[in-house]
Amino acid sequence: MSSMSNGARAATALTAGVSAVGAGTAAWAVFGERRRFQLRHETLRVLPAGSRPLRILHISDLHTVPGQESKKRFVQSLAALRPDLVIDTGDNLSHMRALPYLLEILEPLFEFPGVYVPGSNCYFAPELKNPFRYLWKTTASEDPVDNTRLPTEDMHRAFDAAGWTGLINRHDRLRVRDTVLDFSGVDDPHLAYDRHPGFPETPSDDDAAALRIGVAHAPYLRTLDRFVADGADLIFAGHTHGGQVCLPGGRALVSNCDLDPALCKGLIDHRGVPVNISQGLGESRFAPVRLFCPPQAVLVTLTD
């Protein structure tokens, strides 16, 4: 029998090498990257002259499943930052029995003032679907709504009892340290539950807010446009997971909404207004992968 040619041996070695790299990448995406929690820092000069700096901790998309101890340790460690305000932009749950564990994770952050809005995975549990559909669809809005209801009302009652303020299609005015902030929040745009309330009216100069902040789960263009039209100075959103599975360098393939994938994470500009988009702290329990896009919380420092 003739021996294998040099070309055949090279092709076999190349195939084996590619397979090994592919297997290694998949293993990293499942077991490594999604536990490589990071804290991103941003600074914005948006406060009136003479204002004291404010530090806002932005968390999003925890997609909590009981037993996620590495996530729990990271989120609880964020309390050491002593933020002036926590903003939670939704998708907190990914399991029917996750609420007690979520509240345990967030307990140290309840020490600080907070505001929150819900995402679809605050209402409905994720269902098993072909995970590759995420890569060829620009938005999941055509998908049927998952119909397994989560304990949404119980979660919101617990948040309220901890002193956080729900911004579910409503506005509110909060004094954070010495600064008055006006908030406008909407229910999840991904589910088309959003109804914009505008910002609180200012009856006199004495009550004028230093900043107007829009808060939403999903950064659909219509949502960002409406916040801008209503006079927002700053917007917070999540939902995109930063693309979740990205190319080397972090280039997102999809945004899971109508926002350009190139703009689906980080601090971006939308019609002159800064928008902070979190790439999230978790992922659906049926798609537990991240690649070139680690889970992340954000500390945004506002200065004059």
Image (cartoon, rainbow, N blue to C red):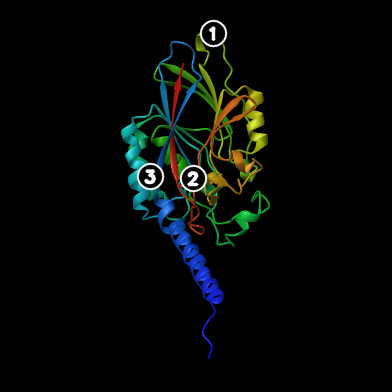
Amino acid carrying label 3: it is Leu
Which secondary structure, mark 3? helix
Q: Which of these two is toward me, 44 or 126?
A: 44
Q: List the residue tagged with mark 2.
A: 61
> Looking at the picture, does residue 176 appear above or below residue 106?
above
* Secondary element type, mark 1: helix
Question: Which residue is nearer to you in this view: 10 or 230?
Answer: 10
**Amino acid type of the residue tagged 2 in the rendering:** Asp
Q: Label 3 belongs to which residue? A: 103
User: Residue type at mark 1?
Assistant: Asp
**Residue 54 occupies quadrant:** top left
Closer mark to the observer between disc 3 and disc 2 = 2
Q: Which residue is mark 1?
A: 205
Of labels 3 and 2, earlier in sequence is 2
| Pointer 2 local density, CA inside 10 Å: few below 14, some 14–19, many at least 20 | many
Q: Nearer the viewer, residue 33 or 150?
A: 33
Picture coordinates of residue 68, whole percent (x, y): 37, 53
CA gap between label 3 and label 2 equals 14 Å
Q: How many angstroms separate mark 1 from mark 2 (CA)?
A: 37 Å
Please tell me how many numbered marks the rendered image carries.
3
Q: Which element is circle 2 on?
A: loop
**Image location (x, y in percent) of residue 43:** 46, 26
Residue at image location 55% in from the left, 43% down from the top: 239
